[in-house]
Image (spheres, helix red, strand yellow):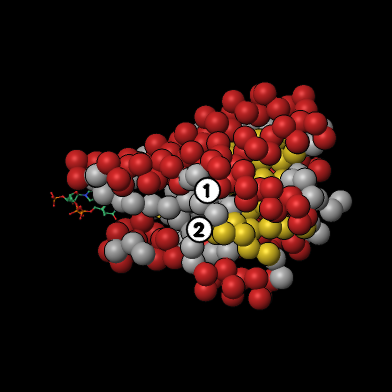
Amino acid sequence: MTRTAIVTGGTRGIGESIAVALQKAGHKVAATYAGNEDAAAKFTNATGIKAYKFDVADYAACEAGIAAIEADQGPTDILVNNAGVTQDAPFHKMSAEQWQKVISCDLDSVFNMTRPIINGMRDRGFGRVINISSINGQKGQFGQANYSAAKAGLLGFTRALSQESARKGITVNAIAPGYIGTEMVAALDQKVLDSIVGQIPVGRLGTPSEIADCVTFLASDQAGFITGSTLSINGGQYIAA
Ligand code: CAA
């Protein structure tokens, strides 16, 4: 069945792959982006998926952005909260700006995007909210007190909202990717990256499509009994109970 989807941070990295996979599954898809115009133009040219520029850290911008998307493609059935940034530093060197930037973009954004959409899903009796967390929200990571806090926050949010939404036909799940071959991971110091790959039993980084295919399944009608869950996709690097 054709549904409508929004993927935040959907023009690059894991988000791009998710947007394309949802399109391939037959859905109408909108992608949001923060500022990389070249990447957004390239993405839209390659996929035909429209990209909308607004700041997911800003509630009013999200309300306006969602209204523009819904005017184009109709009410939202599937919301993938994927947008996120890193500002890595050991906590004793972390600035208030580094902390705030990551909490706003990676955690507040999920409130800002989901809150304007949830009542429509409730009224229509169907919804899929998929939150892209991280292995580092599950286990913590040296240099990422801000990111680990935000990504762990997403897991709590997922569990609470899933309970509130279950009777309304809305499922709310999280995916916790491990280290995936994207620009974000490529930006790591090579020695740090080598040591991380050494901790992955599968012996390699993941690929964006390995995340996207799972999002597509969680977004499908067949996944209606899966809610409140966290799916770890990390090559065995961290095996959560
Ligand atoms: N555990 C314990 N100690 C560590 C450590 C670790 N993992 N990493 C570094 N240290 C130690 C260093 O050995 C050093 O000790 P000494 O002072 O005794 O030599 C001390 O901590 C300081 O280390 P640095 O000089 O490297 O600190 P820095 O300020 O230059 O930068 C850092 C640290 C930038 C955070 C760097 O450690 C780093 O890049 N870490 C990896 C962070 C990471 O994994 N980010 C993931 C990005 S991708 C992503 O987030 C996507 C996703 O969801 C998975």
Name the residue at 51% across, 36% down.
154
Measured in 3D between alpha carbons, the distance from the residue under mark 2 to the one under mark 1, in whole angstroms, is: 8 Å
Q: Which residue is mark 2?
A: 34
Residue highlighted by disc 1: 56
Left or right placement of residue 3 versus residue 153 in this view: right
- Secondary structure at numbered mark 2: loop
Residue shown at 70%/53% (left/top)? 69
Is 181 placed left or right of 141 in the picture? Answer: right
Q: Give amino acid for label 2.
A: Ala
Q: Is residue 187 above or below residue 235?
A: below
Q: Nearer the viewer, residue 64 or 211?
A: 64
Q: Single out the residue that lies furthest toward the right.
A: 1
Q: Which residue does the image show at 27% across and 41% down from the upper left?
A: 96
Q: Circles 2 and 1: CB distance less than 8 Å?
A: yes
Residue type, label 1:
Val
Mark closest to the chain's N terminus, 2 or 1: 2
